[in-house]
Amino acid sequence: MNREMLFSARARSMKRSVIRELLKLTSNPEIISFAGGLPAPETFPVAEVAIATNKVLWEESSKALQYGSTEGDARLRQDLVELMKQDGTPANPSDILVTTASQQGLDLAAKIFLDPDSTCIVGLPTYLGALQAFKSYQGKPVGVPLDDNGMIPELLEETIKKLEAENRRPKFIYIIPDFQNPAGVTIPESRRHEIIRIAREGGYLIIEDTPYRQLRYTGKHEPTFQSLAPDCVLSLYTFSKILLPGFRLGWVYGPDWVIDKLVMAKQGTDLCSPPFNQAIAHHVMASGALQKGLSKTIELYAQRRELMLSCLDNHLLSVPGIKWTKPEGGLFLWLTLPEGMNTDDMFHAAIQEKVAYVPGSAFYPDEDDHRSMRLNFSYSSEAQICEGVKRLGALIHKSLGS
Amino acid sequence: MNREMLFSARARSMKRSVIRELLKLTSNPEIISFAGGLPAPETFPVAEVAIATNKVLWEESSKALQYGSTEGDARLRQDLVELMKQDGTPANPSDILVTTASQQGLDLAAKIFLDPDSTCIVGLPTYLGALQAFKSYQGKPVGVPLDDNGMIPELLEETIKKLEAENRRPKFIYIIPDFQNPAGVTIPESRRHEIIRIAREGGYLIIEDTPYRQLRYTGKHEPTFQSLAPDCVLSLYTFSKILLPGFRLGWVYGPDWVIDKLVMAKQGTDLCSPPFNQAIAHHVMASGALQKGLSKTIELYAQRRELMLSCLDNHLLSVPGIKWTKPEGGLFLWLTLPEGMNTDDMFHAAIQEKVAYVPGSAFYPDEDDHRSMRLNFSYSSEAQICEGVKRLGALIHKSLGS
């Protein structure tokens, strides 16, 4: 059998993510890992899930354990409309598609928009799972740099003009507006209007991916892109960071003609997301446990963020040229080392010192930033944060000296 | 925004499945529906699932509600190896990938094998969800007719030779060997060897899709393609028909170099299937509830199959030229009307008479059979089967007369 000939062109270009292989090294329990993007398990509302699950099993099992509609549980979609409304985003249930978490939202969007060699705009840096989804359909993500206020509109406009001139019109603009993964930065309202103006003028769709939006610890609430421009924004949400990841549930909201195509794409992909999990999520939301749990999660993560920032001050402020972002929410901050240092090279030494991060290169379409790292502050305990930043600090000082 | 220009070529060719739209008509509770492919909800082991779920929530929630590995829960993969071994198929856990049910197995296989215009072999008729998955990657399914013993080897060989001569070498041979959907037929062992010989000689991969394999009511056990030719067979399994569909869990087993690529494809698609559901499925299997439930399910479906066959004898044996298959297992039988009749046209009349089926055309890549229908015997109660076949019989006799 000619194996290479057998695979599709898209499969031939798939590679095992180097980063995911590296992260396997971090499973050693002695290693303090700031690498993953995991929520803290102590935030999982176990009792509330148990109550909801028993309700589902004893009162509605013949429906919840059966096949469901591709669009998703009608009650859950209504709950999600309420959640979006409370966040200032008017929505209607018929334009919601429940997905197998937001990674599926990214996959389905790539499936319906990207042809081989289609371009799309992403932040520099951006979420590595999005890069993986877009590349798996042979799309070509084109980066637009971020600053402390997120994607820079002038550079976005310039990049689009350049692509248009080359006849490589991007299929969409992919943005993580709130506490961006990996940079931790948030786009202020004025800049959101600016980006929307650029999208509308060129006739572009914005894909707004906002998994952490409800996790704000400080600063002022910004309106969603969806609420500002429902005509040209497709929004991806997930339960993974606001409830728990183990259900693999998320949702997509946007213009009906886009949702319609996404429903067709999802039918052939997995028929429907688990009706059992959707029914449980509905009862958890109906009981108010989601909101109650969120307040506690916010309190916990706010403390951990504060602690990590203060430990970084303690151990690294003295390094000339170093900098890190101060996210107002979410799970991550972004640390940039002085010129000449290399976080890819330093990764194995870090593992030796029993501390882990994700090298910044993973978040670039061409892997061409080697001075940065992403640090997660949601998963580790306070003691681990203190000790982990200390280890990281010692390592950076040592690398600087050598 | 130029909507058509925005979509990918594959999305532009996606259409809402006519059949799924038709099936929405059957949601009226007065209609007796033989159309769906639903398991009977009375077979769902609710108490066993409740026990397993409580175990998962109170003993291992921090793992089961968290992200999991793309490959799947290690304990569950070990359980699946045992299940396959009991079925005469040696397997090892590292070559199992847990999927979001077998529809995702089909989607991922299409993703890694099919380029636009790639051909692949399917039965005539074949599972409509497979056609949808293959077409969603712009693949071109090419049909090979079945007889009462499944895919006809001589016609398979002929079709492959023809495609090779046209330089359109098929990427794989897609087969549902046991109680085929929709035809209900099973491939005997001798013919399995014949098909494997053809595949090996041409260097082709066989995709064996066997969702109902454990549901045999009569006749003799046939070996899996996987057990006969592990070098060139990728097997798709699902929990949907042997436990329950609402978890959306299945698995894929095959050569390591194929599984390796499927894992990469799945990473970008949905990261992992729900760890919560996988943990529950593991405990249900460990408690023996899957096997115990299966015996009861087999008993129930065997009765319903027997009843449907005898009702068809009562009401339709007198129609000249009519025929139907007598499946030894699974959920479906396949009824073919006399020359000149049309099951697409008759569908709306059937809805008027409050009985539903799936028109045979749905199971053909080019929708070019109009004399057949698929009837499901697992979902309806015995009273509904009697009454539904009576209504169908009256309708066919009426159509014959007109």
Image (cartoon, coloured by chain):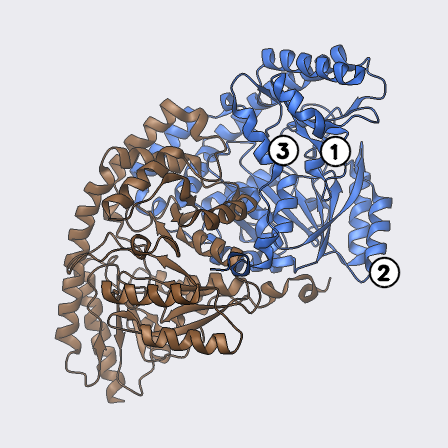
Chain colours: A blue, B brown
Chain under numbered label 1: A
Taking the spot 64% from the left edge, 44% from the top edge, the residue there is A130
Q: Which mark is residue A212?
A: 3
The lab-note entry on whether marks 3 and 1 share a chain reads yes
Label 3 crowd (10 A; few <14 / some 14-19 / many >=20): many
Q: Is residue A272 left or right of residue B400?
A: right
Q: Amino acid at mark 2?
A: Ala
Q: CA distance from mark 3 to mark 1?
A: 11 Å
- Quarter of the figure with residue A194: top right
The residue tagged 1 is A186
The residue tagged 2 is A165
The residue nearer to you, when weighing A386 against A74, is: A386
Q: Is residue A21 left or right of residue A327?
A: left
Residue A309 in the image: x percent, y percent? 72, 17
Q: CA distance from mark 2 to mark 1?
A: 30 Å
Q: Earlier in the sequence, mark 3 or mark 1?
A: 1
Q: CA distance from mark 3 to mark 2?
A: 36 Å
Residue A84 in the image: x percent, y percent? 60, 40
Q: Earlier in the sequence, mark 3 or mark 2?
A: 2
Q: Amino acid at mark 3?
A: Tyr
Q: Amino acid at mark 1?
A: Thr
